[in-house]
Image (tube, rainbow, N blue to C red):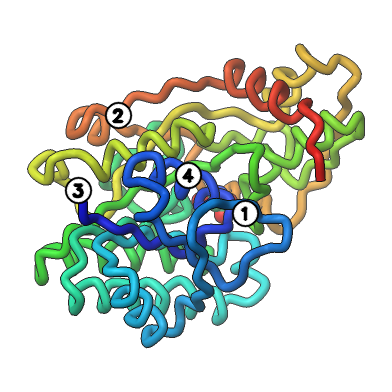
Amino acid sequence: MPNDTILITGACGQIGSELSQALAQHYGNNNVIITDIRKPDNFQTDLAFEALNVLDGGRLVELVQKHKITHIYHLAAVLSASGEQDPLFAWQINMEGMLNVMQVARERGIKQVYHPSSIAVFGHDTPKNDTPQYTLMNPNTVYGISKLAGERWSEYYFQKYKLDVRSLRYPGIISYKTPPGGGTTDYAVDIFYKAIAGKKYECFLHENSYLPMMYMPDAIRATLELMNAPSDKIKIRSAYNLSAMSFSPKEITQAIKKHIPEFRISYKPDFRQNIADSWPQSIDDSSARNDWGWKPEYDLEKMTEDMIANLAIPTTV
Ligand code: SER
């Protein structure tokens, strides 16, 4: 622990921007290096930033050596909806990027690697409700295919090279600090921005599209609990199912209306509807609960209240 130094890829993204702060609290500001393809102009951080294209394995080695990195959190990825716009590019970033990280981790004796997976690993053939840990997968998006391949590679590196790789299948993540980019579950974030701005929201999914979701504080805590659990508690090296709540656009609208009664929504499903239809509606995460004690804190009501309270605070940009 005293000599542990963390490198995060995709650190300026939705999860990275909050996970890096949580890791800095745990390991100390000087021991967390954040990387991304570039730092957005308005991105504020006290942590050391290094530019990194995850396709550049040489640059990754250079940073690992320079900062004596011991742990890598590999978050850089192209999400489900963006991935469909340029499938080969998404495959390259998600797959080659991941394999670069795995290979550097193996060769440089990295102690631990985190590589998130997603509910996108499931497909039309998967049972929709209480989706089990082990079931038919058959994903249809390039994002889901790459995440499923990534899960297999994670287990492969663990079994073959004893690399301590850990992973979670995140549901849709809702947060207010950094907007998400290019996901199918992102409607559940955008809807809050519109509601707070007093605007109507046009939803790209139909009103009864149920999807598994999670509030960011739960997602961060799950990640830290997984990574800090004793190794013998981690029985699954592909990726753990993880669950907190499920809701539809209609239900989140009702939850928002309790705080903002005049809020209005309309529905205009687009290509993302087909992606949503291929994913589970709810997830059985009993392995995570039993193996390392996972338990979510936020449900739809509690999350909605917190999102609205935080988004209502005027920002000084
Ligand atoms: N939130 C992701 C997406 O919609 C799923 O992991 O792409």
* Circle 2 or circle 1, nearest the eye: 2
Q: Say if 192 sits above or below 110 in the image.
A: above
Q: Are marks 1 and 4 in contact (CB under 8 Å)?
A: no
Left or right? Give the position of 245 relative to 109. right
Please state the horizontal and vertical placement of residue 99, each as a whole percent of the image.
33, 76
What residue type is disc 2 on? Answer: Trp
* Circle 1 or circle 3, nearest the eye: 3
**Residue 143 shows in the view:** no
Q: Which residue position holds label 1? A: 183
Q: For mark 4, does the 10 Å Cα neighbourhood hold few (<14), some (14 to 19), or many (20 or more) residues? A: many
Q: Nearer the viewer, residue 83 or 222?
A: 222
* Circle 3 or circle 2, nearest the eye: 3
In space, the residues marked 3 and 2 are separated at their CA atoms by 23 Å
Q: Which residue position holds label 3? A: 1
What residue type is disc 1 on? Answer: Gly
Q: Quadrant of residue 108?
A: bottom left
Q: Quadrant of residue 198?
A: top right
Q: Which residue position holds label 2? A: 294
Q: Which residue position holds label 4? A: 21
Query: Could you say whether the residue bearing mark 4 is in a helix, strand or loop?
Result: helix
Label 1 CB-ligand 1 distance < 8 A: yes
Query: Could you say whether the residue bearing mark 1 is in a helix, strand or loop?
Result: loop
Please state the horizontal and vertical placement of residue 78, each as a whole percent of the image.
56, 66
Label 4 CB-ligand 1 distance < 8 A: no
Q: Earlier in the sequence, mark 1 or mark 3?
A: 3
